[in-house]
Image (cartoon, helix red, strand yellow):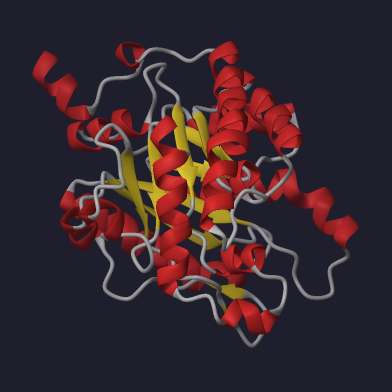
């Protein structure tokens, strides 16, 4: 299993809070954010990248400033939040590499895409603490994954070359002809095996869907070993996500990278309303989430396994 270098570990420390747990606010969504801001497709089409940038700037200023890290995209939000001094000096910055949406193969599988021109070197130039790559995986359909695994390996190698932190995320999905019942029953296994694929590709930090059960969380933690993993919210309601986080943390997770469960009903094209909801509703939810993480407890950073460089120095 590939361990973090000293530089990667430093980036990892920065996306964690003082308790050693990952506490990142995700708002790198584009298409999904448009659907929350407007119900009508014609109205969604009128929402420009600059307008999305306004929303992401408000999330960064009023919500992410209360966390240890924010995850943003390089089309709407970065470098704007840096250049306009919106991003707090104490808030780490992850920059998403994945493009919004996906292509579809002739067989109906989802093909992930990258934002053109955004690699490890560009993430560093934009002031990023690290990057994040998301790909779609169906571990039970090897033929579905070839394109996406190639992207994953490419990004991991690129960030390793630059010695820059990369968070690896994957999502599962329902395939054509598969019933919702059958798909739902497979989710714990699909998340576990997607984790295995990501680790085999060299992932050093993971962002994972909640796998469905305490037992699945424990198996993922055992499989991941010294590789930390954070649970994502996937847009579930806040109360549901709190329960998922408690279970995940008690079974080895290292924190959360949460987005829509915190802010999905707080954003608005009316920025005055948006700012007020973020400062009150979203921050209140964040505090509850942080309390769950604190209650479940994390090992301090000093207790984490040493990097390869540290071990060589000691010997």
The image position of residue 88, as x and y in percent, is 29, 38
Number of callouts: 0
- Residue furthest out toward the front: 272
Examine the image and state in which quarter residue 292 appears: top right
Report whether residue 258 is seen: no
Report whether residue 216 is seen: yes
Q: Is residue 6 left or right of residue 67?
A: left
**Which residue appears at 60% of the width and 58% of the height?**
268
Q: Is residue 183 left or right of residue 283?
A: right
**Which residue appears at 49% of the width and 53% of the height?**
27
Compare residues 283 and 72 and report the one nearer the observer: 283
In the figure, 105 relative to 94: above or below? below
In the figure, 308 relative to 135: above or below? above
On the rendered image, what quadrant is the N terminus found in?
A: top left
On the rendered image, what quadrant is the C terminus found in?
A: top left
In the figure, 21 relative to 271: above or below? above
**Which residue appears at 65% of the width and 62% of the height?**
36
Q: Is residue 289 left or right of residue 1?
A: right
The image position of residue 115, as x and y in percent, is 37, 72
The image position of residue 170, as x and y in percent, is 54, 54
Compare residues 45 and 181 and report the one nearer the observer: 45
**Which residue appears at 41% of the width and 49% of the height?**
71
The image position of residue 162, as x and y in percent, is 17, 52
């Amino acid at each position: 299993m590939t361990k973090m270098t000293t530089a990667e570990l430093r980036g990892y420390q920065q996306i964690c809070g003082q308790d050693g747990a990952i506490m990142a606010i995700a708002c790198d969504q584009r298409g999904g954010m448009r659907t929350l801001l407007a119900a009508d497709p014609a109205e969604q089409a009128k929402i420009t990248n600059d307008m999305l940038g306004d929303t992401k700037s408000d999330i960064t200023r009023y919500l992410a400033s209360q966390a240890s890290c924010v995850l943003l995209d390089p089309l709407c939000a970065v470098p704007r939040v840096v250049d306009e001094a919106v991003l707090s000096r104490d808030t780490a910055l992850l920059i998403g590499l994945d493009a919004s949406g996906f292509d579809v193969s002739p067989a109906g599988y989802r093909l992930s895409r990258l934002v053109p021109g955004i690699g490890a070197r560009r993430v560093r130039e934009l002031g990023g603490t690290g990057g994040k790559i998301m790909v779609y995986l169906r571990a039970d359909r090897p033929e579905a994954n070839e394109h996406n695994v190639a992207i994953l390996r490419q990004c991991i190698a690129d960030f390793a070359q630059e010695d820059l932190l990369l968070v690896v995320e994957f999502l599962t999905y329902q395939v054509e002809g598969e019933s919702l019942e059958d798909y739902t029953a497979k989710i714990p296994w699909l998340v576990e095996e997607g984790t295995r694929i990501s680790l085999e590709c060299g992932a050093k930090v993971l962002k994972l869907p909640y796998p469905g059960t305490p037992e699945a969380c424990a198996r993922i933690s055992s499989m991941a070993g010294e590789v930390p993993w954070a649970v994502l919210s996937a847009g579930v309601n806040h109360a549901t996500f709190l329960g998922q986080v408690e279970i995940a943390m008690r079974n080895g997770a290292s924190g959360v990278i949460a987005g829509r469960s915190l802010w999905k009903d707080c954003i608005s094209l009316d920025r005055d309303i948006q700012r007020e909801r973020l400062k009150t509703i979203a921050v209140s939810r964040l505090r509850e989430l942080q309390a769950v993480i604190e209650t479940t407890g994390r090992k301090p950073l000093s207790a984490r396994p040493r990097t390869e460089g540290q071990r060589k120095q000691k010997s």
